[in-house]
Image (spheres, rainbow, N blue to C red):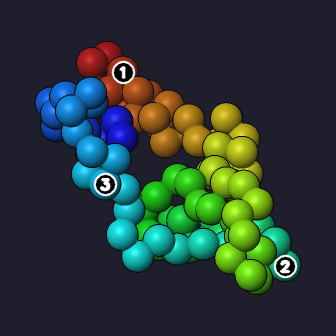
């Protein structure tokens, strides 16, 4: 919702949920390895993925932050900051 509603300047109180929802949602099942879900998230360009049972019942949501740890998700931004500081110096 942050990227699809708030960042675009839309009013969250008046914008329907459908405006921020993902179409053709990809999901993971609990029998797949974590690496499979991470690969799907990377390829799809998203950070969260629903985990569902084979009957379609939702179990939860996995995020890249949960899986990789806060340090790894901030690694890219830290590299950018270092490059900026290097340019300044």
Q: Give the quadrant of residue 40.
A: bottom right
Q: Is residue 2 visible?
A: yes
Q: Earlier in the sequence, mark 2 or mark 1?
A: 2
Question: Please, is residue 5 above or below residue 21 in the view?
Answer: above
> Would you call the spot at circle 1 few (<14 residues within 10 Å), some (14-19), or many (20 or more)?
few
Question: Residue shown at 36%/21% (left/top)?
Answer: 85
| Helix, strand or loop status at disc 3 | helix
Determine which quarter of the picture holds residue 65. top right
**First along the sequence among labels 3 and 1:** 3
Residue bearing the label numbered 2: 31
Circle 3: is it few (<14), some (14-19), or many (20+) Cα within 10 Å?
few
Separation (CA) of disc 3 from disc 1: 41 Å
Q: Which residue is mark 3?
A: 18
Front: mark 2 or 1? 2
Q: Which residue is mark 1?
A: 85
Q: Position of residue 78 (x, y in %)?
A: 50, 31
């Amino acid at each position: 919702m942050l990227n699809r509603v708030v960042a675009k300047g839309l009013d969250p109180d008046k914008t329907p949920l459908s405006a921020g929802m993902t179409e053709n949602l990809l999901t993971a099942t609990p029998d797949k390895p974590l690496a499979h879900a991470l690969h799907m998230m990377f390829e799809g360009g998203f950070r969260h993925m629903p985990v569902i049972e084979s009957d379609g019942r939702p179990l939860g949501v996995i995020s890249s932050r949960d899986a990789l740890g806060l340090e790894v998700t901030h690694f890219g931004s830290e590299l950018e900051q270092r490059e900026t500081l290097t340019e300044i110096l």
